[in-house]
């Protein structure tokens, strides 16, 4: 490994954990998107947590831990005014480093702003979340419970369903790989659905839209079923019209100025046991490409992280 000598103002950090996110697949595609696609020959973009080894930077000292767009690499040189948005992490008892990538990181924040700010759940409402045992979906469901919703999670294995129902107290968990999952969804939503927190798209989203109440809210967080295929996210908009649905997409980076306040609240819920989380840790930098594929095979429960 070649690390150049540091100039005045720079710091060298060793990456300890890489956050593995479905959006990395989107960043690799040469299509219009919310950030420029990663070009061939560039370091692959990723969020990560790094520790300062050496510093000539005014804001960071040796031993500080930072989060930001480290990229898929083992070392990162941080420059003055670095656009990769590095934030120094506080040291908080009861919270692990990896919590800052999941529950207090982009996933928890996505769940927080998507559900609480956009959907504004009311006590007694029915919330359906897809990708329910993943990093984002598992927090969405728990925030729904904190706010008095009846929560139905859709996930891809019996193990995942057991976790969200037995440990996270979702009211109903449906394994969409069971042949009768659509009937289970109908049985679980006798009065219809107020909020669809959509992480997947395709046939799962269509089945949930069929259960929406009039004027229901659809929070478009992700459409992972289409990231590796060309399938349309929705075959027909008529459901949206007939049910008079409000459909709102969002990108969490738009809420960056309010991350600190939301992370503080998520941290309180985590420390008081109102939010539980799980990590799937893959060890070894060389396994990062394999880890990205795991997201699309459903091989993670909770937050997927590569530990270097
Ligand atoms: N809008 C934003 O700002 C924002 C921010 C963060 C994340 N997101 C989106 O939120 C969603 C979840 O992201 P995450 O980081 O929390 O990942 P995650 O849920 O921890 O992992 C992805 C999960 O998606 C499920 N999945 C993969 N392919 C699928 C398919 N074809 N059909 C159904 N389920 C499939 C798998 O679980 P199963 O075993 O259940 O299939 C997999 O474990 C993604 O769509 C992501 O793009 C959006």
Image: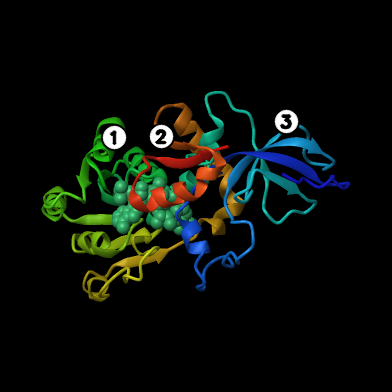
Q: Which residue is mark 2?
A: 278
Q: Is residue 27 left or right of residue 11?
A: left
**Furthest residue toward top:** 93
104 relative position to 146: left or right = right
- Between 190 and 130, the one lying in front of the other is 130
**Some atom of ligand 1 lies within 8 Å of the CB belonging to the residue at label 3:** no
Q: Secondary structure at mark 2?
A: loop
Residue 70 position, x and y percent, is: 64, 48
Q: Which residue is mark 1?
A: 163
Q: Which residue is mark 3?
A: 63
Number of residues whose C-alpha sits closer than 10 Å to that of mark 2, classed few (under 14), some (14–19) or many (20 or more): some
Q: Position of residue 131 (x, y in %)?
A: 33, 50
Disc on res. 76 = none
**Residue 269: quarter of image:** top left
Residue positioned 30% across, 30% down in the render: 167
Looking at the picture, does residue 127 appear above or below residue 97? below
């Amino acid at each position: 490994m070649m690390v150049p000598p540091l100039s005045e103002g720079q710091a060298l950090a060793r990456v300890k954990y890489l956050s593995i996110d479905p959006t990395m697949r989107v960043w690799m595609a040469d299509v219009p998107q919310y950030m420029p696609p990663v070009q061939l020959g560039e370091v692959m973009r990723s969020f990560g947590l790094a520790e300062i080894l050496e510093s000539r930077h005014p804001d960071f000292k040796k031993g500080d831990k930072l989060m930001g767009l480290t990229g898929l690499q083992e070392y990162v040189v941080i420059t003055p005014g670095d656009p990769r948005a590095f934030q120094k992490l506080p040291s908080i008892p009861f919270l692990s480093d990896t919590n800052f990538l999941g529950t207090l990181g982009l996933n928890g924040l996505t769940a927080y702003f998507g559900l609480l700010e956009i959907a504004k759940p009311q006590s007694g409402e029915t919330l359906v979340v897809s990708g329910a045992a993943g990093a984002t979906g598992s927090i969405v469901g728990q925030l729904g419970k904190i706010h008095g919703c009846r929560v139905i999670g859709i996930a891809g294995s019996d193990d995942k369903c057991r976790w969200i129902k037995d440990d996270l107290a979702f009211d109903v968990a449906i394994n969409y790989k069971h042949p009768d999952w659509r009937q289970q969804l109908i049985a679980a939503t006798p009065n219809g659905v107020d909020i669809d927190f959509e992480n997947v798209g395709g046939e799962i989203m269509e089945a949930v839209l069929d259960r929406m109440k009039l004027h229901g809210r659809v929070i478009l967080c992700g459409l992972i079923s289409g990231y590796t295929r060309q399938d349309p996210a929705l075959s027909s908009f008529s459901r949206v019209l007939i049910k008079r649905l409000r459909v709102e997409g969002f990108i969490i980076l738009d809420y960056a100025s309010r991350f600190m306040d939301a992370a503080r609240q998520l941290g309180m819920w985590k420390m008081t046991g109102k939010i539980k989380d799980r990590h799937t840790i893959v060890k070894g930098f060389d396994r990062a490409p394999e880890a990205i594929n795991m997201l699309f095979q459903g091989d993670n429960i909770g937050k997927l992280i590569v530990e270097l």
